[in-house]
Image (spheres, grey):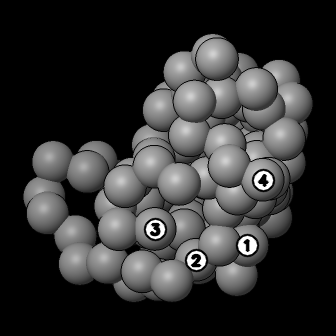
Amino acid sequence: MIDLKCKCGKCEFNENCNCRANTIKITGTSRCATYTPSADRSKAEFSDEISQPLVRPSVEVLCEAKCLFNKSGKCLANGISILREDNSAECGTYLPK
């Protein structure tokens, strides 16, 4: 994945808008199943206005959604954004087929 931005600052895997998980799984409803609320209550939300280096450029994104970028269960988009949605996270790059 060339460009992966995560806007879920309070996720266990988020580090300055970069996801540290080995694999990200997007469900059939475009929800990020990898999202795990951080147990660290002091963990802050960081803005992505400051350019961040790619921490994990080789992270695998598995996808079950009926999305234009889903090819055989893997996301082939050049980049994705994961957005916060109440107490969960959603793929902001999702485009229905």
Q: In front: 27, or 33?
A: 27
Dot 2 corresponds to which residue? Answer: 59
Circles 1 and 2: CB distance less than 8 Å? yes
Q: What label sits on residue 1 in the rendered view?
A: 3
- Give how far across and how far down residue 9 sits, in percent: 52, 52
Dot 4 corresponds to which residue? Answer: 72
**Which residue is at 23% across, 78% downward?**
53
Q: Is residue 49 left or right of residue 80?
A: left
Of marks 4 and 1, which one's residue comes earlier in the chain? 1
Disc 2 from disc 4: Cα separation:
17 Å
Dot 1 corresponds to which residue? Answer: 23
How packed mark 4 is, by other alpha carbons closer than 10 Å (few <14, some 14-19, many 20 or more), is few
- Give how far across and how far down residue 94 sits, in percent: 57, 27
Of marks 3 and 1, which one's residue comes earlier in the chain? 3
Q: In front: 25, or 44?
A: 25
Compared to residue 90, the image places residue 49 above or below, namely below
